Image (spheres, helix red, strand yellow):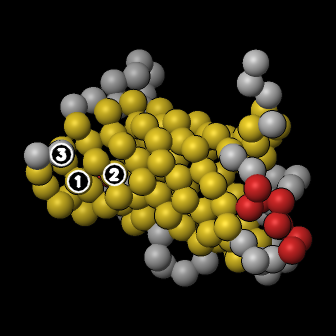
Amino acid sequence: MLNLKPLCPAVVDVAAPLVVGKSPAGIRTIGEMRAVTITGERMNATLAGAAAADWILVNGKVGNIDVRMTVRTDDGALIYISYTGKLDLARPGGPVATVAPTFETGDERYAWLNDIQAIGRATLAVGEGGAARLDYEFYEVL
């Protein structure tokens, strides 16, 4: 049985994608993150810097997610977050992302993040011009 402990919800706002185009592997698009807000009992953070994006590769009705970002906690710690996963574009009710984030930090207050594996699920809402919002729920795998 998989045991999960709630980690944090997160809201990710993504700019209209840069479409690299179709290659033999699929259609590569880059979704630059405009804002990230993480709120929870164990961590509160927002996007730090501008180097944050999803280098997604879409092939058919599935997108292969590849995200990297850095966030700054409300008490000043920097945390690097990376995750891969799948975006189900054909799911009834709208696209859903399922991901497996890992974390890196040198801040002792959040050192526990270096040792955990998390999973997450998000709904995706696409707005005008292709900008998107993802509403995540992240969990620590125990």
Circles 3 and 1, Cβ within 8 Å, touching? The answer is yes
C-alpha span from label 2 to label 3? 11 Å
- Mark 3 residue element: loop
Quarter of the picture holding the C terminus: top right
Query: What type is the residue that disc 1 sits on?
Result: Arg
Q: Are there few (<14), some (14-19), or many (20+) residues within 10 Å of tag 2? A: many
Residue with the most extreme front position: 115
| Amino acid at circle 2 | Ile
Q: What's the amino acid at mark 3? A: Ala
Q: Which residue is mark 3?
A: 25
Relative side of 67 to 131, left or right: right
Residue 136 in the image: x percent, y percent?
Answer: 61, 44
Q: Nearer the viewer, mark 2 or mark 3?
A: 3
Q: Position of residue 78 (x, y in %)?
A: 70, 77
Mark 3 and mark 1: Cα distance apart in space: 8 Å
- Given contact means CB atoms under 8 Å apart, are the residues at marks 2 and 1 in contact? yes
Q: CA distance from mark 2 to mark 1?
A: 6 Å
SS at badge 2: strand
Comparing labels 3 and 1, the label whose residue is closer to the camera: 3
Q: Residue at x 74, y 61 (%)?
A: 114
Q: Earlier in the sequence, mark 2 or mark 1?
A: 1
Image spot of residue 33 (x, y percent)? 46, 65
Q: Residues within 10 Å of mark 3 (few under 14, many from 20)?
A: few
**Residue 2 seen in the current view:** yes
Determine which residue is flagged by label 1: 28
Determine the residue positioned at 13% across, 55% down: 21
